[in-house]
Amino acid sequence: MSRSSRLRQRNDAPPGPLAVHALPSPRTFRLVLFALAMGGFAIGTSEFAMMGLMPSLVRGLGVSEPQVGHLISAYALGVVIGAPLLAILGARLPRRTLLLVLMGFYALGNLATALAPTYHALLAFRFIAGLPHGAYFGVAMLVAASLAPAAQRGTAMSRVLLGLSVAILVGNPLATWMGQVLSWRYTFGVVALLSLLTVVLVARVLAPAPDEARASPLRELRDFHRPQVWLALVIGAVGFAGMFCVFSYLAPTLVEVTGMREAWIPLALAAFGVGAIIGNLAGGWLVDRYRFRATAIVLAWSVLVLLAFPLAALSPWTLLPAVVAVGTMGALAPVLQSRLMDVAAQAQTLAAASNHAAFNAANALGPWLGGMAITAGLGWTSTGYIGAATAVGGLLLYAWARRIARRDAEPQ
């Protein structure tokens, strides 16, 4: 084996201490993944429901569309703040206990959302509901990875994220329908019930791990401040922004550029959901085979997809396949989650939770950049070119991370 190959193996090898659970039977493993994905479905439905429920909220609360947009921002802010904060506060808890606490907290946040008497109360409850989002996904994927054979941990993590993708495909349209037929309050009431169902399922199928190593908040904070951890997070915040840049302005692009009726918007959203499911499955497969190098593959694919989007938007026959392709960019999530597990040492919980804070930063960065381009008169399809530029930025950050990893391994 060549010296460069040995260095690459060192840099890409998974950490040994991650497997804190004894490997369960295949049936139990599938049940655990289903229970964790159920939590992802509940979270995804709640997160994306506001976009489809906007008209119902405007009518029901007597507020404007921008004010409903503030509700979306409040939830995202809760994710960014809550992910590292709750990961640190819960570091000493067993992961099973932390999962139960986080989903119980999420159920209460969404129940409060459903019962909010005023707009300002709703604003506060959406922020509170967002707090456990990132920490839950981080801990859930750590558990999934620890229960899987080393060569299949990427696939296991992608199964947990599959709940989020199914929420985009199924949960969001159902939430919109429920808001139109009944009330937007029923949507968040159902999410609270799904969260409680997740608590019950996790408690039943995930056995306690008496030998699990306890994390230390101080050690988590110390090991979190590593260049490779921060580079992985910034790659996600920058490289993933292009997907949100296009997705946020998909509806007006479909109507104003493609010339389709508004009735086709749900179909376009469903196409994005199909792409997200494909991306999650592909991301798990890629990371099991290529480890960190899968980041370059996904980002290069993202550049091609986003550059093709403006041309594809000119025709209904090419727009929907292009939207599916944009959805596949979600493959980056399990890839970077695996990378963080490799480089975070004893900061596993904090790093895993912060990954979702980074993706919510991308959710803020992408629409902001796209909005600036549209306001400047560059047109709705300029989001594709802006998004491609952010994906290129992610590739440059990836190259920097690889260079630092090789340099650090050189003396060895």
Image (cartoon, rainbow, N blue to C red):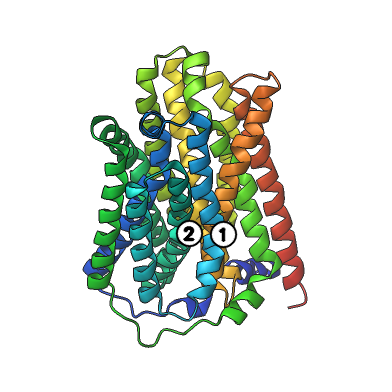
Q: Answer left or right for 322 relative to 38.
A: right
Quarter holding residue 341? bottom right
Residue found 77% across the figure and 67% down from its top: 407
Residue 206 place in picture, x, y as percent = 28, 73
CA separation in Å, label 2 and label 1: 7 Å
Residue 399 place in picture, x, y as percent = 71, 53
Mark before the other along the chain sequence, 2 or 1 = 1
Quarter the C terminus occupies: bottom right
Whether label 2 touches label 1, CB < 8 Å? yes
Identify whether 326 is placed above or below 299.
Answer: above
User: Can residue 104 be seen in this snapshot?
Assistant: yes
User: Tag 2: Cα neighbours inside 10 Å, few (<14), some, or many (≥20)?
Assistant: many
Residue topped by disc 1: 81
Residue topped by disc 2: 131
Quarter the N terminus occupies: bottom right
The residue under label 2 is which amino acid type?
A: Leu
The residue under label 1 is which amino acid type?
A: Ile
SS assignment at label 2? helix
